[in-house]
Amino acid sequence: MRTEPGPDGQPRCWWCLSTDQYVAYHDDDWGYPVADDRRLFEKLTLEAFQSGLSWRTILEKRDGFRAAFAGFDAATVAAFTEADVERLLQDKGIVRHRGKIEATINNARRLLDLQASGTSFAAYLWSFEPRDPGPVGASTTAESLAMSKDLKKRGWKFVGPTTIYAFMQAAGVVNDHLPDCSHHAKSVAARAAFERPAA
């Protein structure tokens, strides 16, 4: 795990330097706290689609995913039918994987169930924030294992502990910018100022 100089000479986490799009994602999106259910649904869906693939593949298709899944509006996606599944299997703008498409529709319905119970997806996610985040670079943690197990019990799909930990990284629940990355301190500051959702 190392940092390398980015286009502006500032040190960044090594994994983000292959494309300008990757750098922008690292600088402006990854590791910063999120409390909006729609944005969180997008992040979880993209992490689920990434399983077995490179994140670069998913990032390059991000606009396609947004178009295909109605801007990640859970109520709209929850109403998708088998005809929508077949339509999406022909959509070259996304990764055409039946199981992951069907899981996204299922997860939209489970998200609505969670909201109907009186808890936002954001409040649910942040309830698993670790007190001690542990070392940077982990692939799973006790918290991601616990959240994965609970989501599966609630009927969510493609939510294994590695996917959930990547989701926690992306949503800023943990700060996995390397300590000498130029964006580590920015993430620390954003997390310190962030108001954890209560419901």
Image (cartoon, helix red, strand yellow):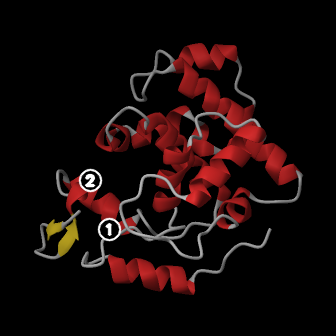
Q: Amino acid at mark 2?
A: Gln
Q: Position of residue 108 (x, y in %)?
A: 70, 39
Q: Residue at x 59, y 40 (%)?
A: 159
Say left or right for 103 vs 98: right
For the residues labelled 2 and 1, the Cα–Cα distance comes to 10 Å
Q: Position of residue 75 (x, y in %)?
A: 75, 41
Say left or right for 192 vs 16: right
Q: Earlier in the sequence, mark 2 or mark 1?
A: 2
User: 113 above or below 181?
Assistant: above
Q: Name the quadrant of the N terminus.
A: bottom left
Q: Amino acid at mark 1?
A: Asp
Say left or right for 173 vs 196: left
Which numbered tag is attached to residue 158? none
Q: Which residue is mark 2?
A: 21
Q: Name the quadrant of the C terminus.
A: bottom right
Q: Residue at x 40, y 29 (%)?
A: 93
Q: Assign a secondary structure to mark 2.
A: helix
Q: Residue at x 34, y 77 (%)?
A: 184
Q: Which residue is mark 1?
A: 27
User: 80 above or below 66?
Assistant: above
Q: Position of residue 64 (x, y in %)?
A: 43, 35
Q: Quadrant of residue 196?
A: bottom right
Q: Assign a secondary structure to mark 1.
A: helix
Q: Residue at x 89, y 53 (%)?
A: 117
Q: Quadrant of residue 183?
A: bottom left
**Is there any visible trace of residue 77 in the rendered image?**
no
